[in-house]
Image: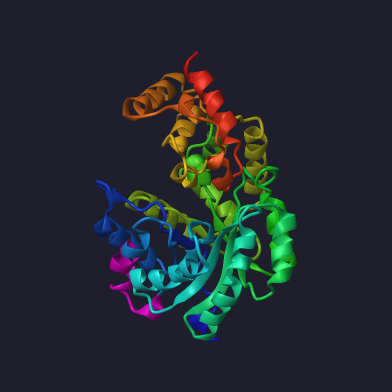
């Protein structure tokens, strides 16, 4: 394997292409292109998209693939079996992704969002064999999967599929000991089997970019010029075995901030690690809803409830104490459509949620809170 395709040679910062800037309802390709340019100029190469990220693969083609030599960047995308009714439809996602991106091949290809209620579908549809076949053809360089479950299942999958080269895990300092996310336990299993790790949700859907005041004060007292997001990203980038840390940057300002401390990356020192531990202790008392706004829950909701938006409004109140701001945010949701009390408790949202949030119960709590 030559250096350009080495699994170690991508840089510690990855560009997550799920939350790209928009102009109206469409992705702003012009601004995305500027962000791509800044990212590449800083020496980073890892771009991460997925078949199910609406418009992302097409934008990747315009902002990256058509503008840079193929060997100058590394591109990852994903196949999501739960959205496919048949094996043929699932496998077709690969060809569709190749066509959308125009990338010729994928440096990193992932089976997407494996967890207890869907991982067997990847087996039934023979998708492991399929991606191995594509690798043999030279259309995939490295095989991996993204994962949203516990360490027992992760170990089971890694034992069954030793061909896996890397795993994409949700890791951030807030979820490190969270029993619902099991960041640390999953990390330790992946390292036990010698797998590289790409990190998703290092800033927890953006929530760690604006943490509670007590946590923010910890950070600013130590380093006034460093953003809260920088602490979150540097925490995971400081772990052993990290291939890259994906940041879903939505504007040029976020890109500039990330590059300011990741271009010349320095792992957290001992004092900074102590500060992170204290931040985690503070956050352990929080009743925040751990929603990352991936919106997988909304696709199957028969009532079309904007669940992530409601949870965001709720977190303004219970996490930040912003009672009036939360009320206004929730009222804006009601002005456009259904609120939390429209839930019919069908449970489809909970089956899709990679964070394993008890969405039905949380919606009830939101409805009760905002009608007080």
Q: Quadrant of residue 119?
A: bottom right
Answer whether residue 120 is magenta in the image: no
Above or below residue 65? Residue 252 is: above
Above or below residue 273? Residue 97 is: below
Q: Position of residue 59 (x, y in %)?
A: 31, 62
Query: For this rendering, which residue is in front, 242 or 317?
Result: 317
Above or below residue 109? Residue 331 is: above
Quarter of the picture holding the N terminus = bottom right
What is the magenta range?
59-72
Q: Position of residue 329 (x, y in %)?
A: 39, 27
Query: For this rendering, which residue is in front, 260 or 240?
Result: 240
Query: For this rendering, which residue is in front, 317 or 155?
Result: 155
Q: Is residue 184 visible?
A: yes
Query: For this rendering, which residue is in front, 73 or 274?
Result: 73
Q: Tell me: 157 left or right of 259.
A: right
Residue extending furthest front?
86
Answer whether residue 61 is magenta in the image: yes
Please report the residue visible at 60 percent of the width from the left and 62 percent of the height from the top. Answer: 121
Above or below residue 306? Residue 75 is: below
Please report the residue visible at 51 percent of the width from the left and 71 percent of the height from the top. Answer: 108
Q: Position of residue 12 (x, y in %)?
A: 52, 64
Q: Is residue 318 visible?
A: no
């Amino acid at each position: 394997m030559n250096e350009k395709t080495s699994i170690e040679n991508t840089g510690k910062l990855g560009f997550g292409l799920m939350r790209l800037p928009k102009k109206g309802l469409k992705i702003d390709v012009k601004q995305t292109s500027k962000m791509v340019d800044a990212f590449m100029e800083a020496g980073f190469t890892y771009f991460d998209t997925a078949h199910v990220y609406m418009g992302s693969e097409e934008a990747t083609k315009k902002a990256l693939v058509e503008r840079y030599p193929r060997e100058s960047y590394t591109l990852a995308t994903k196949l999501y079996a739960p959205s496919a009714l048949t094996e043929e439809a699932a496998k077709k996602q690969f060809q569709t992704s190749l066509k959308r991106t125009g990338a010729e091949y994928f440096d990193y290809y992932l089976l997407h969002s494996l967890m207890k209620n869907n991982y067997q579908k990847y087996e039934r549809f023979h998708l492991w064999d399929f991606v191995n076949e594509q690798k043999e053809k030279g259309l995939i360089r490295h095989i991996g999967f993204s994962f949203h479950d516990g360490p027992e299942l992760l170990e089971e999958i890694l034992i069954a599929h030793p061909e896996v080269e890397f795993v994409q895990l949700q890791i951030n300092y807030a979820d490190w000991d969270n029993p619902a996310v099991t960041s640390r336990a999953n990390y330790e299993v992946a390292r036990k089997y010698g797998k590289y790790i790409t990190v998703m949700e290092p800033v927890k859907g953006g929530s760690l970019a604006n943490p509670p005041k007590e946590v923010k004060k910890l950070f600013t007292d130590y380093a006034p010029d460093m953003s809260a997001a920088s602490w979150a990203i540097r925490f995971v980038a400081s772990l052993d075995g990290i291939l890259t840390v994906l940041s879903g940057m939505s504007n040029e300002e976020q890109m500039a901030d990330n590059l300011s401390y990741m271009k010349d990356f320095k792992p957290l020192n001992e004092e900074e690690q102590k500060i992170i531990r204290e931040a985690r202790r503070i956050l352990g008392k929080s009743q925040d809803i751990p929603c990352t706004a991936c919106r997988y829950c909304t696709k199957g909701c028969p009532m079309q409830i904007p669940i992530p938006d409601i949870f965001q409004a709720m977190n303004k109140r219970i996490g930040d104490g912003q009672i009036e701001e939360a009320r206004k945010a929730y009222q804006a949701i009601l002005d456009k459509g259904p609120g939390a009390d429209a839930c019919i408790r069908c449970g489809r949202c909970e089956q899709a949620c990679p964070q394993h949030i008890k969405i039905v119960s949380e919606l009830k709590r939101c409805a009760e809170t905002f009608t007080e």
